[in-house]
Amino acid sequence: MTSSRDKGLSRIADILAKHPANRGSLIPVLQDIQQDFGYLSEEAVAELERRMGISANEIYGVATFYTQFRFSPPGEHTILSCQGTACHVRGGRQILTELEQRLGVTAGRTTADGKFDLERVACIGCCALAPVVAVDGKVHAQVTAKKIPSIISRYAGEGNFS
Ligand code: FES
């Protein structure tokens, strides 16, 4: 029987096979692994170390330089709090603070139960609806701090965020 670890390793082998076998491929390989697995796990980095001959330290050194890479599994839902100018002047900062307090995490983190990623972003292109919060790509318009508990509850399933 094939374990999920073996399947993961074979997916990494497939990804590596798509790229030239040299150091210049490291970033595109990391991007493909993240796209496929959702993050860069310790196992994935160890496998790259073994197969590419690049030390894990060096891989982490490269990956941590870019904000696009994450090292823990993504949350079930992604909440983007817009901090672009239009949203900022209409209370975006207070909304982000409310989100951080309700979820118990700072922007850039995943909640302990793995339900939510909270991200601070610049303009997401809906300035006329400012201030906005987007959850899994759905834009919530003219958000106020008071509306945050009900927005979170819609995605939280069980749990009390009010
Ligand atoms: S500044 Fe928030 S959508 Fe443009």
Image: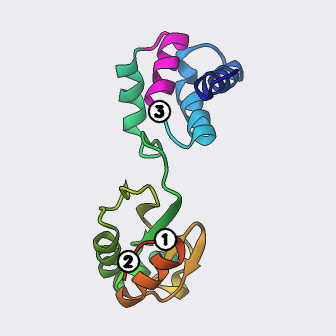
Residue at numbered disc 2: 161
Numbered disc total: 3
Residue at numbered disc 1: 156
Image height check: is 47 above or below 160?
above
Residue 148 is situated, as x and y percent measured from the top left of the image, at: 41, 82
Circles 1, 2 touching at the beta carbon (< 8 Å) = yes
Other-residue count near label 2 (Cα within 10 Å), few / some / many at <14 / 14–19 / ≥20: some
Residue under the image location 57 percent in, 77 percent down: 139
The amino acid pointed to by label 3 is Ser
Residue under the image location 44 percent in, 72 percent down: 82
**On the picture, is 93 further left or further right than 2?**
left
Closest to the camera, between mark 2 and mark 3, is: 2
**Sequence order check, earlier mark of 1 and 2:** 1
Magenta segment boundaries in residue numbering: 41-54
- Helix, strand or loop at label 1? It is helix
Residue under the image location 35 percent in, 73 percent down: 99
Circles 2, 3 touching at the beta carbon (< 8 Å) = no
